[in-house]
Image (tube, rainbow, N blue to C red):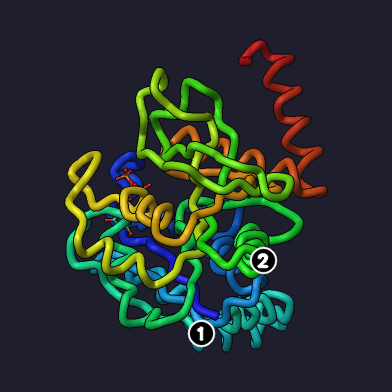
Amino acid sequence: MKAVIPAAGLGTRLLPMTKIQPKEMMPILNKPAIQYVVEEASFSGFDQILIITNRNKKVMEDHFDRNIELELALRRKGAYKALKELERIEGLANLFYLRQKEQKGLGDAVLCAENYVSHEPFAVLLGDDIIISDVPAIKQLWDAYERVKAPVIGLEIVPKDHVERYGIVEPGEEVEPGLFELKSVIEKPDPKRAPSNMAIIGRYILDPEIFSWLKGSKSGVGGELQLTDSISRYIPEKGLYGMLITGHRVDIGSTSDWLKANLEVALLDPELRPKVSQYFDELRALGKI
Ligand code: UTP
């Protein structure tokens, strides 16, 4: 099964950190964000993964490649646990890389995958959205795709005053708990005119028809080729479903989101949780928060 991870964006909201360092390589605790995403795809059975990258993000490829010098050093030190972890990361999937030449938006990044995908349905996972869940989010969508035999996109309920940051759906019939037939999708709507507060999060199962629609579409919000605009074409053609993901999404798009993501993941770690709580207690006692 094939998955595509668009990770070629400029990450301007995280400057200056992202001037040299790709946003997707920002750490969430001790792992780069993109590793969580590759693991989610791999644990869901996607063994062929194409990462859309750009000329300044070679370090992402290096992260998943072997580092013989490091391996030798770890072996000499007897650091076998670390060595095993490196081998696990290198063996996660068959990874392919393709450069998006100009950052013309998410739709354009997905379009870069056309030849790789060929005629099969495929998964798209955004490289800067991490979803913490028992069943990997993209597996939840793939299982739903197999039941409804039509494209399925991942959804999350967001506060009403945040809808203008997301693609928002107009849900129709709820065909299974949390799985909706969709009537329309709209990118970054004005909160007053938003059809719901169900937001599209960075997980999709799409059919290859999307490529011809992307090729025929014009730039949308922000002058970028929007994926949401082309996805809406599925609705009259073959149907489109949206599924509320069981899990919790953490985004790393802005500095505050990235900081929150680190804290949330730390609080889920049984070893780190008491240390983080204690640190906050200390800050509170000192009157710093
Ligand atoms: P974002 O819009 O969140 O990422 O795209 P960005 O453009 O890097 O961020 P800012 O707004 O400048 O801070 C969501 C995902 O789509 C990828 C990004 O890498 C990110 O993983 N993307 C976006 C591309 O691959 N190419 C693009 O042209 C735009």
Which quadrant: the N terminus?
bottom right
Where disc 2 sits, the SS reads: helix
User: Which quadrant, please, contains the C terminus?
Assistant: top right
> What residue sits 64% from the left and 57% below the top?
137
Q: Earlier in the sequence, mark 2 or mark 1?
A: 1
User: Is 241 positioned to the left or the right of 96 in the image?
Assistant: right
Assess whether mark 1 and mark 2 are in contact (beta carbons under 8 angstroms). Answer: no
Residue 103 image offset from top left, x and y in percent: 22, 57
**Residue 133 showing in the rendered view:** yes
Indicate which disc residue 152 carries.
none
From the viewer's perspective, is residue 243 above or below residue 195? below
Report how far apart the C-alphas of labels 2 and 1 lie in the structure: 27 Å
Q: Amino acid at mark 1?
A: Asn
- Marking on residue 94: 1
Q: Which residue is mark 2?
A: 147
Secondary structure beneath label 1: strand
Instruction: From the viewer's perspective, tell me whether residue 71 is left or right of residue 134.
Output: left
The kind of residue tagged 2 is Arg
Q: Residue at x 61, y 74 (%)?
A: 42
Q: Position of residue 73 (x, y in %)?
A: 58, 83
Q: Nearer the viewer, residue 121 or 224?
A: 121
Q: Residue at x 75, y 45 (%)?
A: 268
